[in-house]
Image (spheres, grey):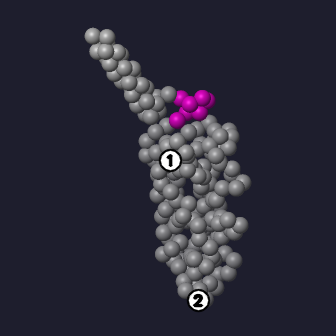
Amino acid sequence: MKKLRTLIILVVVMLIALVLLLLANNGVFKTGEHRTEYGTQALFDYDMDKVTALEWNYPGQHYRFNRSADGVWTYDGDPSLAIRQDHLQGMLIIHHQLLTTKAIDGVDDYGEYGIDLAEEPTATVWTGTVPYRLWIGGRTQITMDYIYVADQDGVVYVTDAYVRTAFEYTLEDTLDGGAEK
């Protein structure tokens, strides 16, 4: 009888812990002063047809490509280079379709989430004079999700999508056979 009572208490404690875990994962609890929202949403909302430029940092390098009104990409540093159009269009699609599963707002110190805005790689899409900048953070040790910051809006975004490799290209990687136009 004593063993049965101990087993029942253990099961009840485990059920309470499970309920608390489910509530925490569904955004019922707030983490400190930051509010956490759950649900899949697009990180950026811009019209892909209005994109005029795409730029990114690759360790020690900065690349910018401009897109003409007819959709042709050129390298900002040398417009005479032949560029792999499909490659840049694919990078743009990845940037545009990045979905987040959790948003933590009210963030004053991105370092709390392992992000150093001065050091992290960025990928920026321009629609005229409006930038849509993405800081690409690392992977969390606990949930193994990826951390992003968009436009320094005080929000840290979490997703399971790893896009860093989509922007780890050099100029040579974007050239169409290295030939000039």
Which of the 4 image quarters holds residue 126? bottom right
Identity, as a three-letter code, of the amino acid under mark 1: Met
Query: Can residue 70 be seen?
Result: no
The secondary structure that most of the magenta stretch takes on is loop
**Residue 171 x, y percent position in the rendering:** 63, 76
Q: Residue at x 54, y 83 (%)?
A: 176
Q: Which residues are magenta?
A: 30-36
Q: CA distance from mark 2 to mark 1?
A: 41 Å
Residue nearest the viewer, comparing 87 with 14: 14
Q: Circle 2: is it few (<14), some (14-19), or many (20+) Cα within 10 Å?
A: few
Q: Quadrant of the C terminus?
A: bottom right
Dot 1: element: loop
Tell me the residue at 65%/48% (across/down).
115
Q: Which residue is mark 1?
A: 144
> In this image, 94 relative to 60: left or right?
left
Q: Quadrant of residue 180?
A: bottom right
Residue 55 relative to residue 21: left or right: right
Where does label 2 land, which residue? 179
